[in-house]
């Protein structure tokens, strides 16, 4: 005899599966790591515009975030190495996430005996702090843009230990510093950063032949974008439309080669030999070495560079050309709109944002002005379910909506990997794709379900504690009432009766959902209920 | 590894499996007319094919690269000679590829050189997008080439594990497929909760969005895998001890992926096409050590895998490729920049191995693509087409590879040709 399945018991009409939440919920899900009930109440009362303006001008983090960071620990464990260092196995507080280069750089020195875990610790700590801020910071838009720019200017510590060692500097003094700022300044900070210098090899690039890695990704990913790469023209620069008048609409391989020459000599003072019997200082900071620079004339994007320019001039000129190029404006505004609205963002918003970006090219708050334009567009409140939450959003939003007492741990990173989210470990300079088809495979779908459910129901991972009682009314008469309350609270919309009925029947295990239930019994069921809700399309999409 | 070990390993494994193979085979044939399994291995990052297989004493090769970035014909790290090479040159394979050399000598492995994407892009991501969509110039096609292959094959469509990615995410070659399964761990491919939840989830994912399709694909495949796991002896989980015992590298992601794939193959789930990625080949600097490690990983993993599937070698074809090769001339960082033509490897019981294929374009300045990179003389689609036609028995090349107008097999595979359909 066939097993009696839940399918025989319930049937939910399609309309009940896809009812959209309110406009403020739609908008808040786009500009935060998930809506909380208190934030939603605030916005419903005071309006969305004020919230957006507030978010565009973030202040210091509040006490809650500081307290969470202060009390956080991150486990560190390694075996002893004879005559080198003792074994360590401890829950250690965070001390490096906000540190300075002079304190961090010695961790990259292989002349000092040290376990690899000590060297990668700065990045691990930044990762913990990014979780705490995504879940608890009031400045949600700042956190979201920080994550956006970390992906746009992706680096991967697997390439070089120095990237992990200096990651707090990259996070604070490059990404966070500029995330609402001016793109030209941002680009230069990235170009000179220790992390990017090692990740894309410019630190070792010298005449000649130069190392092309950074220059290529500068055009292809950081600025103009590969849609404006005229590879079929290869070296026939005059044939790129607009090139003769000094305004080519895109780039070719020759531009990459010439830009790579322009950046020779841009390196890091890491104590390495100059190849001429001298050594650089060993500070870990940006350094220009003229002896490595290819000093002769160049042509980039149809613009001639004279030979023998002063230090840094060639590279800075390239940064000007790519930062102010109209294709860059379009490429980045397209990405911002895709991040903030949908995988296929409305072209009028992209176009409008591009205009704002170009008009504000010299404005120190260029990015803030552009993001404001996007967030104030009417499209920001329209259309639900147009994006799949990234795994980072999925987990952060679940922790936020349940008001969890959350303690990040390194096990979380492994869970995220299984969902395709390689937190500060994405291997290629593209950063994570921002498209539903990337996030959805049978393997990641399964992991999304298992982790979301496990976060509520698998207490041994110790990631979060919950106080459900404090969040609900004094008592419910029946299980069905409790299910209704929590469904609306987690999904932030009322669901039709057929929907909550299906949940109640499942949870009641054959008994009637309309029988009286004690608060204590209900409390036991809530983790299953929220676990299930977090697995539904209503929660997985935004 | 000695050649003899391959043969011994093979026969011993066949003997050990004799009991289960009869039913296994009849089941296995359902997925594909001749039960063939095609494994598509992508070396992400632009593998330096000139460092993997090169003409050791070619004068341009010697002049443009320091010895540590090429295969040499003498010294402690001399390359391993390949018989039946191209253009009468002394082609050698990298000394860390000893297992590949063994497979080549035993005629299981073929080497194709000067192959690749004829589109001149030097962008990793564009090149991968083109190749995985089976296109020369449209990186925005909504379907990968495997997806079109799956849709146009006349074979039974109902096998749950007909297409598989050994990866958390699905590569673009399967873009648009709503039946491809992705997994990284056979033994943990299940819901960690009340089994009734699977039924409940089905009621929530009844829409027509991508997420509904993927949710149902997930639910169907975990249900099927659950049944298989309860009836088949998978030998897993694939942990360090398992890898060691089967001759794989213990701390190598590629080894782990291939061991997992071998596990699925041996479950006889009607698998027809599978993808495995092996990343890290973008060696702009300090190439020597990185390349040695990656090549050793490639060689040892493939060697172990081929032994692991000894009962299935006559049904398996493995193809290894990368998005492009690397510049002939080394840069000043001890590395090589993005290039063009590259090497491809084919391994399997139906490969006419022990031979190099393709047309060697030469390495002198005027022979190079744009005077700088190894030219492409064999379109990558020519190589894939031969697999699709001769092994997977699908003649609809015009549909699978939009814009393809000719079929000129290199004859690196056994199998009969079919009347080709070039319509889109």
Image (cartoon, rainbow, N blue to C red):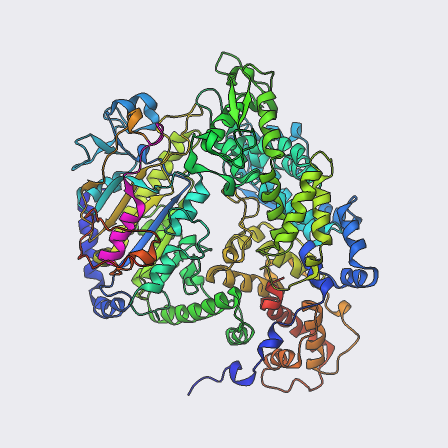
- Residue B165 among those drawn in magenta: no
Count of labels shown?
A: 0
Place of residue B189 in the rendered image (x, y in percent of width and height, measured from the top left):
44, 63
Q: Which residue sits furthest top?
A: A277
Q: Check the image and report above or below for A83 versus A512.
A: above
Q: Residue at x 57, y 38 (%)?
A: A222
- Of residue B120 and residue B209, the one placed in the foreground of this image is B120
**A297 lies left or right of B227:** right
Q: Residue at x 20, y 59 (%)?
A: B418
- Of residue B62 and residue A2, the one placed in the foreground of this image is B62
Quadrant of the rendering where the C terminus of chain B is positioned: bottom left
Residue B288 visible in the displayed image: yes
**B122 lies left or right of B32:** right
Place of residue A299 in the rendered image (x, y in percent of width and height, measured from the top left):
51, 24
- Residue B373 among those drawn in magenta: yes
Magenta part of the chain: B369-391
Place of residue B73 in the rendered image (x, y in percent of width and height, measured from the top left):
23, 26
Q: Residue at x 45, y 39 (%)?
A: B123
**A84 lies left or right of B131:** right
Say which quarter of the image contains residue B242: bottom left
- Of residue A287 and residue A119, the one placed in the foreground of this image is A287
**A473 lies left or right of B197:** right
Q: Check the image and report above or below for A536 versus B358.
A: below
Quadrant of the rendering where the N terminus of chain B is positioned: top left
Say which quarter of the image contains residue B43: top left
Residue A212 visible in the displayed image: no
Place of residue A448 in the rendered image (x, y in percent of width and height, measured from the top left):
55, 61
Q: Which residue sits furthest right?
A: A46
């Amino acid at each position: 005899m066939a097993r009696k399945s839940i399918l025989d018991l319930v049937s939910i009409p399609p309309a009940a599966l896809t009812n959209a939440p309110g406009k403020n919920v739609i908008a808040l899900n786009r500009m935060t790591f998930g809506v909380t009930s208190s934030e939603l109440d605030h916005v419903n009362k005071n309006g969305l515009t004020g919230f957006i303006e507030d978010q565009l001008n973030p202040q210091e983090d509040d006490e809650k975030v500081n307290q969470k960071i202060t009390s956080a620990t991150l486990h560190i464990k390694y075996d002893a190495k004879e005559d080198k260092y003792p074994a360590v196995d401890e829950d250690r507080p965070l001390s490096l996430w906000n540190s300075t280069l002079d304190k961090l750089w010695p961790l990259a020195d292989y002349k000092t005996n040290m376990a690899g875990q000590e060297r990668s610790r700065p990045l691990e700590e930044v990762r913990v702090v990014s979780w705490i801020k995504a879940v608890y910071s009031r400045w949600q838009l700042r956190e979201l843009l920080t994550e956006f720019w970390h992906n746009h200017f992706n680096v991967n510590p697997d390439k070089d230990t120095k990237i992990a060692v200096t990651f707090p500097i990259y996070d604070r003094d490059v990404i966070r510093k500029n995330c609402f700022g001016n793109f030209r300044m941002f680009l230069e900070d990235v170009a000179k950063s220790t992390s990017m210098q090692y990740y894309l090899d410019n630190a070792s690039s010298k005449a000649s032949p130069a190392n092309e890695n950074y220059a290529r990704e500068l055009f292809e990913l950081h600025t103009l974008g590969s849609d404006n790469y005229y590879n079929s023209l290869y070296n026939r620069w005059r044939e790129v439309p607009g090139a003769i008048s000094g305004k080519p609409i895109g780039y070719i391989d020759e531009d990459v080669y010439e830009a790579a020459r322009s950046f020779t000599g841009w390196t890091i003072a890491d104590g390495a030999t100059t190849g001429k019997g001298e050594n650089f200082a060993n500070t870990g900071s940006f350094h220009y070495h003229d002896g490595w620079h290819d000093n002769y004339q160049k042509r980039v994007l149809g613009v001639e560079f004279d030979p023998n320019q002063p230090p840094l001039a060639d590279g800075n000129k390239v940064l000007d050309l790519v930062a102010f190029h109209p294709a860059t404006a379009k490429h980045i505004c397209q990405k911002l709109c895709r991040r903030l609205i949908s995988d296929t963002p409305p072209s009028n918003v992209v176009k409008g944002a591009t205009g704002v970006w170009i008009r504000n090219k010299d404005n120190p708050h260029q990015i803030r002005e552009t993001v404001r334009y996007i967030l104030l567009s009417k499209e920001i409140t329209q259309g639900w379910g147009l994006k799949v939450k990234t795994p980072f959003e999925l987990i952060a939003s679940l922790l936020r909506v349940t008001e969890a007492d959350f303690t990040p741990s390194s096990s979380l990173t492994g869970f995220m990997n299984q969902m395709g989210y390689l937190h500060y470990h994405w291997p290629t300079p593209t950063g994570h794709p921002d498209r539903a088809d990337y996030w959805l495979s049978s393997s990641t779908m399964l992991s999304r379900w298992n982790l979301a459910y496990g976060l509520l129901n698998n207490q041994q991972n110790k990631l979060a504690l919950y106080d459900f009682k404090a969040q609900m009314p004094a008592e419910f008469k029946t299980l069905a009432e409790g299910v209704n309350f929590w469904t609306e609270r987690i999904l932030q919309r009322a669901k039709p009766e057929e929907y909550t009925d299906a949940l109640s029947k499942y949870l009641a295990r054959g008994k009637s959902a309309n029988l009286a239930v004690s608060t204590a019994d209900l409390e036991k069921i809530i983790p299953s209920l929220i676990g299930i809700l977090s697995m539904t399309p209503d929660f997985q999409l935004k | 590894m000695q050649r003899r070990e391959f043969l011994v390993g093979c026969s011993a494994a066949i003997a050990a499996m004799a009991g289960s193979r009869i039913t296994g085979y009849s089941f296995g044939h359902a997925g594909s007319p001749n039960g063939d399994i095609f494994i598509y291995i992508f070396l992400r990052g632009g593998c330096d094919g000139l460092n993997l297989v090169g003409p050791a004493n070619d004068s341009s090769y010697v002049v443009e690269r320091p010895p540590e970035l090429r295969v040499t014909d003498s010294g402690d790290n001399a390359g391993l000679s390949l018989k039946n090479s191209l253009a009468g040159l002394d082609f050698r394979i990298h000394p860390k590829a000893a297992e590949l050399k063994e497979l080549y000598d035993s005629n299981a492995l073929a080497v194709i050189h000067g192959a690749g994407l004829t589109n001149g892009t030097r962008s990793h991501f564009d090149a991968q997008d083109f190749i995985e969509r089976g296109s020369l110039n449209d990186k925005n096609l909504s379907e990968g080439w495997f997806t079109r292959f799956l849709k146009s094959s006349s074979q039974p469509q109902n096998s749950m594990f007909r297409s598989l990615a050994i990866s958390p995410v699905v590569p673009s070659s399967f873009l648009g497929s709503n039946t491809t399964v992705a997994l990284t761990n056979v033994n943990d491919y299940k819901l960690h909760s009340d089994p009734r939840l699977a039924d409940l989830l089905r009621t929530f994912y009844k829409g027509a969005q991508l997420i509904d399709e993927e949710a149902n694909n997930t639910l169907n495949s975990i249900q099927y895998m659950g049944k298989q796991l309860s009836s088949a002896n998978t030998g897993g989980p694939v942990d360090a001890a398992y890898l060691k015992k089967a001759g794989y590298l213990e701390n190598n992601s590629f080894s782990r992926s291939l061991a997992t794939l071998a596990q699925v193959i041996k479950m006889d789930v009607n698998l027809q096409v599978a993808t495995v990625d092996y990343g890290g080949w973008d060696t702009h600097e300090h190439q020597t050590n990185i390349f040695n490690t990656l090549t050793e990983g490639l060689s040892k993993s493939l060697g172990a895998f081929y032994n692991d599937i000894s009962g299935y070698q006559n049904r398996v074809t493995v193809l290894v490729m990368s998005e492009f090769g690397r510049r002939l001339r080394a840069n000043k960082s001890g590395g090589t920049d993005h290039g063009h033509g590259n090497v491809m490897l084919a391994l399997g019981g139906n490969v006419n191995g022990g031979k190099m294929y393709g047309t060697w374009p030469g390495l002198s300045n005027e022979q190079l693509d744009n005077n700088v990179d190894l030219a492409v003389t064999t379109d990558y689609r020519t190589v894939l087409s031969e697999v699709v036609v001769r092994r997977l028995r699908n003649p609809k090349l015009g549909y699978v590879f939009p814009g393809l107008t000719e079929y000129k097999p290199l004859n690196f595979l056994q199998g009969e040709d079919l009347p080709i359909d070039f319509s889109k």
